[in-house]
């Protein structure tokens, strides 16, 4: 976005006024000339600050757009997350509860492969056959 030649352009705009003010400073005879010299110097400083402010605003435009896009995405995901949960089929296992229990009991990375129902009074179900 910012090009090095922009600084050169700013200097080309400000430098001639500064040089003419320097030449005028060597031959100040009256208070009017001194006040005029001070006003020219003030305008140069204010003008340079305004140019720098505009440059910073131009550089900040993409960042502001990116922040607005992130905020809109966060708002959309918050609306999606606040949607009512899907109805649970009768007889299906509570997968979230089972996954949370496994995560609480196992202190290492894990992945749930299969969830099977067990009839009361029977032993643990057999693990799935390893196809390898």
Image (spheres, helix red, strand yellow):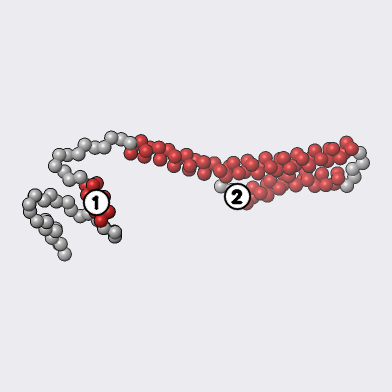
In the displayed structure, would residue 39 be above or below residue 126? above
- Out of 16 and 80, give the one closest to the viewer: 80
Q: Residue at x 84, y 38 (%)?
A: 35
What residue is at 23 percent from the left and 47 percent from the top?
97
Residue 83: x %, y % from top left: 30, 35
Query: Residue 89, how many percent across, how many down?
Result: 17, 39
User: Residue 3 bears which disc, if any?
Assistant: 2
Left or right: residue 94 compared with residue 27: left
In the image, residue 120 sits, relative to residue 37, either above or below, namely below
On-image quarter of the C terminus: bottom left
Q: Residues within 10 Å of mark 2 (few under 14, many from 20)?
A: few
Residue drawn where x is 69% and y is 42% of the image: 49
- What count of labels does the image hold? 2
User: Residue 18: x percent and y percent?
Assistant: 78, 45
Q: Position of residue 20 (x, y in %)?
A: 81, 44
Q: Which SS class for mark 2?
A: loop
Residue bearing mark 1: 101
Q: Quadrant of residue 24?
A: top right
């Amino acid at each position: 976005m910012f090009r090095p030649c922009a600084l050169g352009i700013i200097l080309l705009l400000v430098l001639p006024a500064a040089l003419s003010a320097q030449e005028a400073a060597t031959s100040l005879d009256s208070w009017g000339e001194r006040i005029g010299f001070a006003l020219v110097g003030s305008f140069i400083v204010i003008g340079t600050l305004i140019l720098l402010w505009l440059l910073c605003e131009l550089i900040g435009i993409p960042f502001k757009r990116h922040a607005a896009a992130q905020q809109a995405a966060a708002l959309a995901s918050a609306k999606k997350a606040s949607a009512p949960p899907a109805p649970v089929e009768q007889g299906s296992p509570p997968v979230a509860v089972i996954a949370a229990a496994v995560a609480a009991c196992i202190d290492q990375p894990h992945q749930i492969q299969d969830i099977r129902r067990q009839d009361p009074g029977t032993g643990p179900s057999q693990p799935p056959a390893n196809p390898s």
